[in-house]
Image (tube, rainbow, N blue to C red):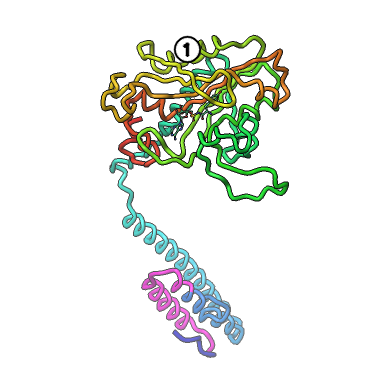
Amino acid sequence: MTESSAQPPTAESIEAITISASAELDRLENLEAVDQWRVSYLGRRGMLTTVLRGLSSLEVEERRTVGALANQAKNTLEERLEERVRQINEATLTRSANQDRLDVTLPGRPALEGRLHPTTQIVREICSAFVAMGFGVVEGPEVEWDHYNFEMLNIPKGHPARDMWNTLWVDYEDPTGEQAMLLRTHTSPMQARVMENREPPIRVVVPGKCYRYEATDATHEWHFYQVEGLAVGEGITFADLKGTLYEFARRMFGEERQIRFRCDYFPFVEPGVDMSIDCFACEGDGNGCRICRDSGWIEIMGAGMIHPKVLEGVGYDTERYTGFAFGMGPERIAMLKYGIDDIRHFYSNDLRFLRQF
Ligand code: YSA
């Protein structure tokens, strides 16, 4: 294809251009080529445009005839161009529809169904049992100050009871130089945090994660959950503590499980107890049982009447208010409820275990 010569246009030359342009257009397969074709024939310097420009050199009569033919040729080529673009677009669509065809008869991919972790489930169940008895639920920080984890719980620096909680210390310089930071070893620091901010009567449970620098075994993890309980008010006695925890055990484990309270020592209670349930693995028999270590009992919580020093520490009048507190291990409770023989299953991320809940 070349640009039209400077020869004056004739009916024959216009017809020749129209025929060859149409034939060329029919052979084009893509839109880029079609656009080049448009520029060559119908563009500002295109062949047909040049012909139209040459009309001025013709005699008036001839110009009228040849001019009409030239305009007709232009219209014809523009229509053919439009038609060819439509055909190419349609062919592209059909091709891609055939290649990327969606088989609507194929079965869909099943959506993966998630579920709550067994610890989350048991923590929620424990909290619900206490909510039903009128307790509220609050949460607190996992990274804690020595002040709340120990000092406010009547465990000053150098107190031998600190050894009961093997502590993971956080390498942080307190600007005042007074406080040490740690990963809370229990949820009990929330006792002081709650009491500092509220006036009795108080009835709350505090679920949350705890950390201890401990060797792991079937019933011990180095990170585990606890649910703390706190009730403060006028005239609260040890009978209220026992009644609340019996009712909790009845709701969680049913009537048939055996419960045992024993005296225990925690510096922040007086008197203090631990509460155990008969071992699910050996049915309380204890002989050679690695779960309860031959005792027939599994300890699930510590509890007691809040020590007056703890109440004084938050500014409560100890002549007026008394209270009880408890702290339990939800994983141990789940072990008892579902017959799980090793606490390490909870955090080993084995789906065969997790899918059972
Ligand atoms: C005691 C008296 C109160 O007035 C209030 C709370 C407490 C509990 C006290 N703060 C405490 O931490 N006691 S404890 O060391 O005996 O832990 C309580 C419960 O947490 C245990 O009975 C056990 O169920 C769970 N637990 C403790 N260490 C654990 C653990 N669970 C898994 N792995 C561990 N390493």
Distance from mark 1 CB to nearest ligand 1 atom below 8 Å: no
**Majority secondary structure of magenta residues:** helix
Please state the horizontal and vertical placement of residue 328, each as a whole percent of the image.
Answer: 48, 25
Task: Classify mark 1: residues with Cα within 10 Å, few (<14), some (14-19) or many (20+).
Answer: some
Instruction: Say if 334 sits above or below 57 in the image.
Output: above
Tell me the residue that label 1 is attached to: 247
Magenta residue check for 67: no
Quadrant location of residue 94? bottom left
Q: How many marks?
A: 1
Location of residue 43 by image quarter? bottom right
The quarter in which the C terminus is drawn is top left
User: As drawn, which residue projects farthest toward the left?
Assistant: 288
Say whether residue 308 is left or right of residue 330.
right
Badge 1 amino acid = Glu
Residue that protrudes farthest toward the bottom in the picture:
6
318 or 205, nearer to the observer: 318
Asked if residue 18 lies in the magenta stretch, the reply is yes
Which residue does the image show at 55% across and 18% down from the upper left?
271
The spot of residue 214 in percent (x, y) is 44, 40
Question: Horizontal placement of 208 versus 105: left or right?
Answer: right
Quadrant where the image shows the N terminus: bottom left
Query: Is residue 37 shown above or below 2?
Result: above
Secondary structure beneath label 1: helix
230 and 126: which is toward the camera? 230
The x, y position of residue 316, in whole percent, is 71, 20
Q: Residue at x 38, y 75 (%)?
A: 23
* Rendered location of residue 230, percent (x, y): 59, 21
Residue at x 53%, y 41% (from the top left corner) = 167
Span shown in magenta = 7-35
Compared across the picture, whether 127 is left or right of 60 comes to left
Q: Residue at x 47, y 64 (%)?
A: 82
